[in-house]
Amino acid sequence: MQNLLQSDIFSHIPDMRYTPRWAVLLMDLLLCCLAYVISFAIGSSVFTYGTEFLALTLWQQMLAVMLVQTLCFWLFHSYSGIIRFSTFVDIVKVLLAVLSCGAIVLVVNMIVLVMSEGEVKLFLNTIPAIYCPLAFILLFCLRVGVKTIYDTVIQHTGQRRRVLIYGTKAAGLAIAKMLRSSGSYNEYVPKGFITDGKDIRSYSIQGLPIYVKNEDLIPMMQRKNIRDVIVSPIKMKEINPAVDLDIFLKNDIRILTTPSFSSWKQDDESQMRVGRIESIQIEDLLERPTISINTENVSGILSDQVVMITGAAGSIGSELVRQTLRFNPAMVVLFEQAESPLHDLKLELTDHYANANIVAHIGDLRDKRALEQAFKDYRPDVVFHAGAYKHVPLMEEFPNEAIRANVLGTKNIADLAVEYGTKRFVMISTDKAVNPTNVMGASKRIAEIYVQSLYRKISASDPQCTRFITTRFGNVLGSNGSVIPYFKKQIAQGGPVTVTHPDIIRFFMTIQEACTLVMEAATLGNGGEIFVFDMGHQVKILDLAKNMIRLAGYRPDVDIPIVFTGLRPGEKLYEEVLNRKETTLPTENEKIKIARVREEDYDKVNPVIERLIETARKESPMQTVAQMKQIVPEYKSKNSIYEQLDR
């Protein structure tokens, strides 16, 4: 029987068209006729009193009752539902239609009896009393029978994937119900639930067994050929995905999720369908609990203020723009060199923030005169400086450009912020500035040194001067050029996935999380601080690649190969953010700490940095890097041609 069901004989059944409404009505009436015949046979043989007064024969009675029943079916639209997708509502409609018919027949019968002064009646009163429950049972059995047969056939035709649902609360039950009721509109058939609770395997929900997430779960799934697990969006928030879903990833079980319940829609026949089911993303596994910040403090520095954001069309800059707009600034100035991304961002923001005052300004941080024009035109109260060159291998190849963009650009905008009375200047730095091993990290460290020393210089004579605040964090999930989009592209192309080194590890943070903490740091800073963020646990890039392959439904090194390419110039195995207790001070936000770093004298640092900028304009990259190492003594090159300078 199992082989018969899995053959292609029944493969057309999921694609069958709906039975027309007139056909459903006809089937219902035929069953009602059968119910009335049975009712008449029982009623006239058991209850013989008064049969001599009947004015109608059996067939006349049945015709009259069917006319009334048809009217009741029409009133309650009991035939409008799709039989194989029948729900509780459909059953209630059938019940009401049958009871209404019985009530009408009894009322008419009583009226005729009264008008004939007890000499004539149309029906035995006992017959409608028998007819109603009997007709309902037959109509109920029709719907349940068709639904059961249909579900049984399509669940064994081999066209649907067997799946377990992680969670036994309302969200999990809703997914199971929708999967079962949506029939051929999805490729999954639920085979049970998974619970984190105690051993309740003897229980079931909706007729489906409950399995405990323990060492026996995976062997059971393999025996039953279950290769998928669905986790509801609500369940994802209740668990630690990286830990609680690891058992499935390691055993090549595909992890799926659904859109939020609010996106589930009704089709034309008012039959609920489940939303689009898709694999969870690697960001879901790496994401951490939602960060709470003091929105009143953030509103206090951004509301009704002119805010300028450099690098506004980049991944970090654009998210800073979106979060800034939540606090109703007087104006947001999008300062960006890249024309097309800036144009796209402006169109997006115009659609979503129609009433906001958003100005797109094309400019280059290295061009001080053009930058000064922007300060003259807009007089920003707050500057978020996110514009920079950030790709390690490229900056290792072009150190002069790294100095011009990351050091000269920062110096230009910092000096103008002081000159034009900007209240707060927030610089976005990187964990690669800590004990740098590459040009990019060292250039950002030099930019940090400049803005810190500048603040110490001006604050000594003017306590109300521009507050310079620096923030450091690690890799951002999904940012432009980050490893995750690169891995996704490689997997989509069938591999191989390239990892530089089997032991390389990195910190990761979502774009939203990073920018939220930047906002909070802006309110905490009194000036001159370098804030470092709690980046959580470091992630092994090899494990990241393997999990991304598994989430895509493939097996690492079987379906998609992983190839090691060697560390790139300037790349190191481990990143640091100085978030250890002995090198940081706490703040009122446990996710943000203040780095203890050496303080520099502006009068000594400024001439050295200006010479470095001049060298980057005129001299060779080797001379530029040599000067960088003098400014940042802890800068030791790794896997780079500049290692010779360290010797």
Image (cartoon, rainbow, N blue to C red):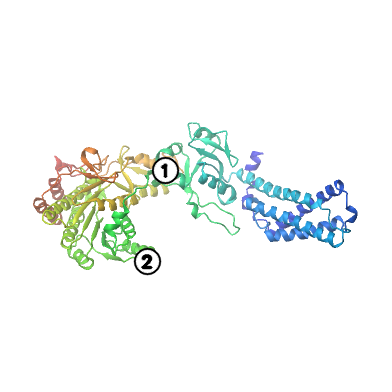
Q: Quadrant of the N terminus?
A: top right
Work out whether residue 311 can be spotted: no
Q: Splitting the image into 4 quarters, where does residue 200 fall?
A: top right
Q: Along the polypeptide, which appears first: circle 2 or circle 1? A: 2
**Label 1 element class:** helix
**Residues packed near mark 2 inside 10 Å, few (<14), some (14 to 19) or many (20 plus):** few
Residue 178 position, x and y percent, is: 56, 49
Q: Position of residue 636 (x, y in %)?
A: 18, 42
Q: Which residue is mark 2?
A: 354
- Determine whether 582 is above or below 479 in the image: above
Tell me the quarter of the image containing the C terminus: top left
Q: Amino acid at mark 2?
A: Ala
Above or below, 248 against 78 in this view is: above
Q: Say which residue appears at 36% left-offset and 65% top-offset.
A: 350
Question: Relative to residue 8, is residue 333 depicted above or below?
Answer: below
Q: Nearer the viewer, mark 2 or mark 1?
A: 2
Q: Which numbered circle lies on residue 549? A: 1
Residue ID at (53%, 40%): 193
Marks 2,1: beta carbons within 8 A: no
From the viewer's perspective, is residue 541 above or below residue 185? above
Q: Along the horizontal axis of the image, is 212 left or right of 463?
A: right
Residue 392 versus residue 237: which sits nearer the camera? Answer: 237
On residue 307, the disc is: none
* Total residue callouts: 2
Q: Answer left or right for 254 relative to 115.
A: left
Secondary structure at badge 2 equals loop
Q: Is residue 551 left or right of residue 628?
A: right
Estimate the spatial distance between the alpha carbons at disc 2 and disc 1, rounded to whole Å.
Answer: 41 Å
The image quadrant that residue 496 belongs to is: top left
> Three-letter amino acid code at disc 1?
Ile
Percent position of residue 252, x then y:
46, 39
